Image (cartoon, helix red, strand yellow):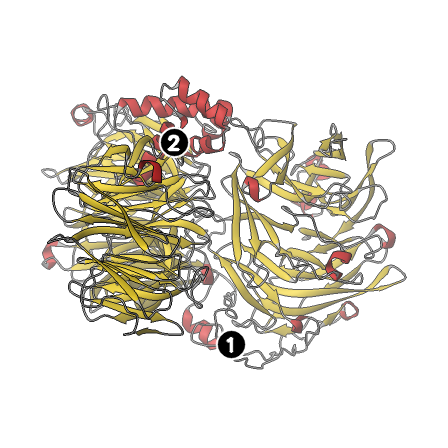
Amino acid sequence: MSIKTHESNSTLNLYDSTLYNSTCCICCLCGDYTRPSRSKSEGKKGLPQLGSEFVMAKTGGIIELYSSDVNTGALKLLSTTKVFSNIRDITNFRVQGSKRDHIVVASDAGSIALFKFGDKSTNYAAQQQQCEIFGMTGVRRPVPGQYVASDPKGRAICIAAIEKQKLVYVMNRDTQDNVTISSPLEAHKAGTITFDLVGVDVGFDNPVFAALELSYADADQDHTPAAAENAKKHLTYYELDLGLNHVTRRWTCPVPRKACVLAAVPGGSDGPSGVLVGSEDEVSYWDESQADSPVSVKLPRRVHHPASEPTLVTSITVHKQKKNKFFAIVQTELGDAFKITLTTSSDKVVGMRAQLIDTLPVAASMNVTKMGLLFLAADFGDHHLYQLEQSIIGLPGSVESTDATKDPPTFLPRAVLQNMRVIDTLSNSCAATGLMVGEFAGGESSPQIYALCGRGPRSALRVMRHGAGISQLAVTDLPGTPSGLFTVRGSEGDEDDKYIVVSFADATLVLSVGESVEEVSDSKMVTDAPTISCSRLADGGIVQVHPNGIRHVKSDGQTFKDWQCPGLKKVGAASCNGNQVLVAYAGEAGEVAYFELDESMNLNLKTEKRLGAEVTCVDVGVVPKGRNRSMFAAVGSPDAVKVYSLSPHDLLSNRSTAAVQGRPVSACMVDMVGDGSVTLSVGTDTGIMQQTNLDAQSGAMSGNPTKRFLGAGRVEASRATVDGRSCGVMLSSRPWISFLSANTGGVVTAPLSYARLDHACGFASSVVSEGLVATSGSELHILTVEDVETKFNETVVPLRYTPRQMCLINGSLAIVEADARDTGEAGKVKLGYGSSAAPSGGGAGGGGGDGMDVSDDDDDDADSDEKKTPVRGPVPEGDSWGSAVRLIDPAKCRTLDVLDLEGAAALSCCAIQFASRGGEVMLAVGISKGLSFEGGVAAKEYGVSLYRVAESRLTLLHTTAVDGPVLSMTQFNSKLLVGVGGLVRLYDFGKKQLLRKCEAKASGCPVRYLSAAGDRVYVGTLGESVKILKFDAVRGALNLVSRDAVPRNITSMCVLDADTVCAADRFGNIFVLRSPSNAVEETLGASFWSDAHIPTLETLCHQHVGEVVTGMKRASLISGGQEAVIYTTITGKIGALLPLKNKDDVEFFTALQSKVGAAAKRPVGRDFAKYRGLYAPVKKVVDGDLVGLWGGLSGEVRAKIAEELDRGSAADVSKKIEGVTSMLM
């Protein structure tokens, strides 16, 4: 597909939209952000307990607020804030006298920003309180922002750079209780590198900050290696004198050279104060009061870990308990977590104890709440919320600080948690290393996104489907294919449904809802005719509309009253609620009859009217709270939908009319906002859903309707309640849901990730409070929607090693995995680490130490998901790789075959179909043996292995040796095109090895990406950007056609057409390059030994996305959607570049972006344009994230911008933005 543009062949404009935010966490915090913390007296009064709140700072400049459910512990996202800057660190801050926590954000904007979170009325949005700018030169070693710490008593904040500079701010409150910030006080120290920074708890003495520093001043004067090796690391206290308003270096002392992390110990009346210092294989306690007698404890070591390689402590968190008790949880780089307790005497620490807790994912950050919940934001793989078990109070086996002269005990890690359990999980796709988009599962209406994610034992293939996830609770066979489906509530005020009414072509089936769903025969409803509409009435009875009339079953459930259609008329469409019934007769005359429930609880015919056109669908909505009737009815005709009044004063008078593209087949009115205004959704037989808002007073349709193509089938619309919100459910070739988004504040229509459904409506019972009952074919399904705000739901296939590449072969996915410093599966199983072996809990003596006694009791839930934890296998000595080639069934998401490669690392793969092999599809794998990174990248052997794939099994045919790393391969002219170092080689099939056909030097750097189209080859390199080669069939040679003049390290690439390539570099830039149209003619006259006259690629578009892009594909995510470039970043973000096809759209969104950027508040003081143009100015790319701030502007500002854009109203601008989003999702 070639790229079509609105002006010329050299013009392209893109709209960059974020489909899925980054999931990689930089830092996490816990505190009281949206409500005051509870005092001890409140706890004694028996007030309801509140869940814990967490803040996560993610890559891409994202701050998210979560709250945990007090009963289940489930995490709920409350708000998301984008700061348009790279966040470097965050910390909690609570000003003295306040009961709510603020957060302090340090970023590359060169500022320190203070935020507080609003309450439910503001959707818990992060609100900027202060923003002090001190330098706007980006991320540099001497620019503060890498570390930020606060005084535990809320009096000061310290922000530090990696090198030299530290700034201290004094914090206060004004008379309006607003937080104020002072001018910065300098605490610089030249010639020092800072490794960590914390605020020391000293009670109400002058605030003190502890920094872990390394002085290199002497090494700067003496350039010998010995001087650098002898440089000492120090723990330094910086004191803020509140009286003199001055910062001094109060105390410093040397600490272990490998110390890298600090944690403050509770002080004042809560503890001894001081800090914990984590280093290699030990944790030590330091404080000024006992500088000459620090206390340290050695950590237990793994049995098979090399004795020559110490284990580094990477994370420490301190948990405060009641009665001035506390303990610390320490984690090492292998994921082993230990409990550290201090022994005190006369306010001095005299001893320490270390006890093994469990092996957890390696944390980027972790926190323990007051309720004993441990939130662990993982470096790679999912984030987890753990419940600390009671067993953590008295853990078996320990190491005392008095055992310093002894070797520490050893242990064998377990893959089953012993002292914790997982209570909730947040998806984390970091690190995403590959991407494929396509409908590979079979039978689904939209493509799936396949992403390679994670690292080591936390690796996985994540299959992501657009739409909210659905849980299937029950499936029941029906005696036929239904034509309609309805639910009927119990008595007035009952929240549970009593009946499920299933309509067939000539009968009705009534099912009772209880502990089970069973057929009933005494409902008094008509069962020998189809049901057109059915509802519970306000009198406790039931109204049923069938083709011959209406049956009103009284509240006693025994008596009923029938109304028959006059003459030969039949009911064609109907709708009813608790007080009203609207019936439309079949035929072109468009006759309708309107009924209401009177005071004596009888249905009375109020009026009949001929509308003049066939009625195809009707809806009377629901009766609003506090009213007796719905004020309007929607009536569909062959080419329009009309709104009629149901007010007694002007019954069935036309209030508004809207043209419809197609024949309306269903209508649904839902009050999503809750203010009386109604959203009218109309489904047509052409698969188009049309939405518009109705004025609550006049019934007029406001603005232009929103139209969206939902699928190839007709659209059936109905109502449901999901997550406490009134929603509209639309069914076409796939189910959709329309709801009021808490994130955007607007009505959003999103797909549901489930098979095609024919009919659906809301359902509630004692088991399912808010669900759906639906039919598919001759089956009845009971479903629940997991989270309507979720854009994607995923299925996870665990992998063994870090995934490197994948390809599609014979309907299966082939994935190559490889990890450095790892062993094969056979070696792991032998040592008790492999997936086939459950590591025993018994300690194994070794390393000269005593065996650690770890409980070996098998709990009943030992194998449950709550107890499973990934364990990295033993770290081997020397250069060793663990690698595998895997086949996965994308439909069932299961592994078909996996081959472990002994002594080799598989780094690339490609499906190849050789012409000489009769079209048989084979798998080519690029391998490296003895790959080492010491002193540069080098390997003993490189090669290309060829595998046959038969009956979902892999069989090695042969391996061809090459003289360079193979990082990319592709099929070209029924041959295999291989990137060997900086060369591009073409191979054909041979019986014993591949046969080289031609070769071309593409670059002086390794070739990272290869793609082919026609007779052209597109090469992405690790230093010389993109080059385009053309194959000369006569000479059998590859010739350079065009190249990029800018040197770039390409991380991902996608071919758009014969002359255009979209690519990304290692600095987070994404750009589109195009070759001149006459490039081939120009290169024909150039000398073959010189490329000085080779045409250069023109940069059409350029933008900084803020994260390294690792995969991109050209695809459409929805049926009928526009094709775009879908990309993923290493941190898990999914974005899309959508071409803007006409000049009006380009001008509109360019102007809107500029005006929103000028009107929106800068969260951390960073200019929006500078952020997106960090390395080069933005070129012809509209920032969808910036345009998305439109919804957060005030009504006055939006109205003013809409007027300046000549777009009528702010609602029209919002619909224009939604229209672009709907093209993608």
Q: Residue at x 66, y 75 (%)?
A: 848
- Left or right: 423 with respect to 1066? right
Q: Position of residue 1185 (x, y in %)?
A: 43, 34
C-alpha span from label 2 to label 1: 50 Å
Seen from the viewer's position, the closer of residues 178 and 305 is 178
For label 1, the SS is loop
According to the image, label 1 marks what residue?
861
Q: Is residue 29 visible?
A: yes
Residue 982 seen in the figure: no
Q: Relative to 417, is 442 on the left or the right?
A: left
Asked whether 58 or 355 is in front, the reply is 58
Q: Which mark is residue 345?
A: none
729 is higher (above) or lower (below) than 334? above
Dot 1, crowdedness within 10 Å: few (<14), some or many (≥20)?
few
Image check: 34 left or right of 1079? right
Residue at the location (46% across, 55% down)? Answer: 427
Which one is closest to the eye, mark 2 or mark 1?
2
- Residue under numbered circle 2: 1214
**Residue 82 relative to residue 516: left or right:** right
Nearest to the observer: residue 342 or residue 150: 150
Q: Quadrant of residue 422?
A: bottom right
